[in-house]
Image (cartoon, rainbow, N blue to C red):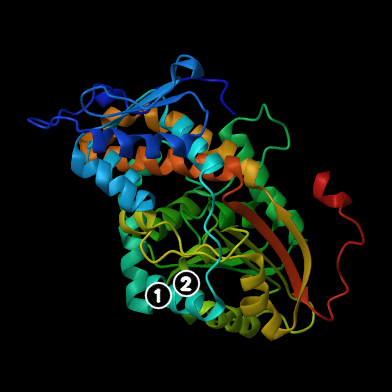
Amino acid sequence: MRNETFVLDRASTSRPAARGQTVSPLDRALLKMIQGAVGSDPIRIQLWDGSTGYASRAGAPAVTVTIGDRATLLRLLWNPDFWFGESFTRNRLSVAGDIGTVLESIYRNYPERGALPGWLGRIRAALTASNSVVRARHNIHHHYDIGNDFYHLWLDNALVYTCAYFPSPSLSLEQAQDAKMDYVCRKLWLQPGDKVIEAGSGWGALAIHMAMRYGVSVRAFNISRAQIEFARSRAAELGLQHRVEFVEDDYRNVTGQCDAFVSVGMLEHVGLPHYHEFGEVIDRVLNPTSGRGLLHFIGRNRALPLNAWIRKRIFPGAYVPTLGEVADQVLEPWNLSILDVENLRLHYAKTIRHWRMRFDSAAERVTKMCDEEFTRAWRFYLAGSEAAFATGWMQLFQVTFARSRTNQIPSTRGALYQ
């Protein structure tokens, strides 16, 4: 994954100073506990005066992390899941080298907490990802309506903000995103004249791809005004407005009937308490005899709430489900048959690697558009996301399903790889 080397924290490789704070024996003892979080990996953790628990026999460190003051040290010990990202964002913790290396090491060495008991997990999920219509609109606005100019700096030309597909490792990001969209279409067995409903359309790339390449009609629903306006403009430029309708509305208000239902990168924003509603929508609009669909979503192996720092800074209201939760609450209540499951997590790690390189190249422009703290937060988010997929903390699932009596499906997977 690391053929290129670049410094994500270029703007602050010198450590932040803690004025007037001397380092105590207790500070050094606490530091050793933090150093242990990266195991034997060549990562040096040091305090504001240069004190370190890094063993010299481990060789020259690849990355040096500097904790800027005692308050940051204590916060890291109290709640590392939140305060590592928050301290980096606030420049109370600096990284000389690639912060992705640090995060991958932590993910490899820091044991994942066990799943919560069923009843407690449901309560916590409800508290952290209960997305009413009003709350969902606020959460989407927080992330996706930052400004199209911002996303143009580091996404591909079509503004596809989901996992790409690399059938060949040499593909560019643009080629891999095009390959992903075509892969989704083949999994849906789209035929000219089909009616498609898409929940969560992003900037419209997939809906336009389906209409242009496969001759289908698409109704795509989204509550991000910035994305909808861009998608409508793009469809009009291509003369596809008669085959693609972009509707600014919540998924709960989807109407009509379709031969194929698709959702790419939206389920994470639904929230576990609303999965039954989401499944009910699919059942309401899907052709009762021959309907089929595809869900493409970030997932995980065990039920846990999303990282608190991610929920605060990046994705408020988000929840990353397990396969079991999606099957149990979205598909099975409506007798929808799961036909195929594929995990593309390493494709997502590679996708984010492309995004990180582009973001780093555009960092100065991002800072001028927003501010330094915003830039640092997004650097940390992208680096942490790549590390999570590279180490298996996060998964990327594509689940294909159909009505239980649908027999018009390919007998092999051969067509997917043509």
Image quadrant containing the N terminus:
top right
What residue sits 52% from the left and 62% below the top? 320
Q: Identify which amino acid the numbered label 1 is placed on.
A: Asn
Q: Is residue 103 visible?
A: no
Q: Which residue is mark 1?
A: 131
Category of crowding for the residue at label 2, using alpha-carbon neighbours closer than 10 angstroms: few (below 14), some (14–19), many (at least 20): many
Q: Which mark is residue 290?
A: none
Left of 173 or right of it: where is 89? Answer: left
Left of 403 or right of it: where is 255? Answer: left
Left of 13 or right of it: where is 116? Answer: right
Q: Which residue is mark 2?
A: 271
Q: In the structure shown, which secondary structural element does the residue marked by tag 2 occupy?
A: loop
Category of crowding for the residue at label 1, using alpha-carbon neighbours closer than 10 angstroms: few (below 14), some (14–19), many (at least 20): many
Q: Is residue 48 visible?
A: yes
In this orientation, which residue lies closer to the viewer: 269 or 123?
Answer: 123
| Pointer 1 with pointer 2, Cβ within 8 A | yes
